[in-house]
C-alpha cells in the first residue's frame, strides 16, 4: 500500500508526458477517426519514450526515474544524428555530466519488515447472508405484506 500511495502521481506525470514532451498536445483534426489515430499514435510514442528511458537507465545503472524524460526527448535525436554506434550508451555516459541523469526528487518509501502472514482459520465464514431487505421494511414501520393481500 505504501508503494502504491507513493506512486499516486504517476498517472499525472504520464499525462504530462503525453501532452508536453513529444509536442503532440494539439489535435490535428476535428474528425473522430483522425483524433482516434492521433491518440493511439501519441500513446505508442509515449510508450516508446518510456522504453528508451528504461534502456538509458539500465546503461547508466540507475533508477528509470533518475533519467530526465524531457531532456531525453530533446537531446537523444542529436546523439543519434552524430552517428554514435550506440546513442543510448553515449547518452547514459554523458548523462551525469550534462544533467540528463540526476537523482530523482521522488519520495522512496521505507517499508517495515512484514511478518509472515497466516491464512484465516478454517471455520471462519467468508460469506454472510444479507439482512438489508428486512431492515428497510422494519425501519419504515411497515409490516411485510403477504402475497394474498
Image (cartoon, grey):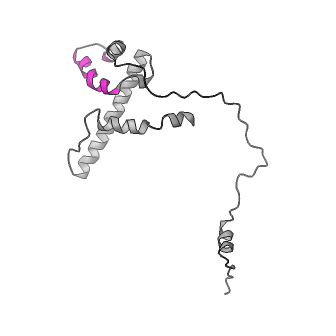
34 horizontally vs 135: left or right: left
12 horizontally vs 126: left or right: left
**Which quarter of the rendering shows the N terminus?**
top right
Write down the region rendered in magenta. Answer: 69-90
Q: Give the image location of residue 123, x and y in percent.
A: 79, 49
Q: Give the image location of residue 144, x and y in percent.
A: 69, 79
Q: Give the image location of residue 108, x and y in percent.
A: 51, 27
Please say whether residue 89 is one of the residues in the magenta stretch: yes
**Of helix, strand and loop, which mostly describes the magenta segment?**
helix
Q: Give the image location of residue 130, x and y in percent.
A: 68, 62
Outermost residue toward the bottom in this view? 149
Residue drawn at x 68%, y 86% is 148
User: Against 137, is 45 above or below?
Assistant: above
Residue drawn at x 37%, y 29% is 50
Residue drawn at x 69%, y 73% is 138
Q: 106 or 57, which is in the foreground?
A: 106
User: Against 137, is 108 above or below?
Assistant: above
- Where on the picture, by quarter, is residue 13? top left
Residue drawn at x 37%, y 14% is 96
Q: 131 or 35, which is in the foreground?
A: 131
Amino acid at each position: 500500500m505504501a508503494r502504491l500511495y507513493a506512486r499516486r502521481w504517476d498517472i499525472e506525470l504520464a499525462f504530462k508526458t503525453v501532452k508536453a514532451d513529444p509536442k503532440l498536445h494539439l489535435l490535428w483534426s476535428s474528425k473522430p477517426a483522425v483524433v482516434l489515430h492521433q491518440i493511439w499514435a501519441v500513446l505508442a510514442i509515449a510508450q516508446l519514450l518510456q522504453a528508451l528511458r528504461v534502456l538509458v537507465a539500465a546503461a547508466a545503472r540507475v533508477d528509470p526515474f533518475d533519467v530526465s524524460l524531457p531532456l531525453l526527448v530533446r537531446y537523444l535525436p542529436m546523439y543519434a544524428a552524430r552517428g554514435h554506434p550506440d546513442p543510448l550508451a553515449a547518452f547514459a555516459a554523458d548523462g551525469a555530466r550534462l544533467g540528463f541523469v540526476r537523482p530523482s526528487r521522488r519520495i522512496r518509501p521505507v517499508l517495515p519488515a512484514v511478518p509472515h502472514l497466516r491464512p484465516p482459520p478454517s471455520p471462519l465464514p467468508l460469506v454472510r447472508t444479507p439482512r438489508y431487505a428486512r431492515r428497510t421494511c422494519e425501519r419504515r414501520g411497515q409490516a411485510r405484506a403477504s402475497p394474498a393481500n
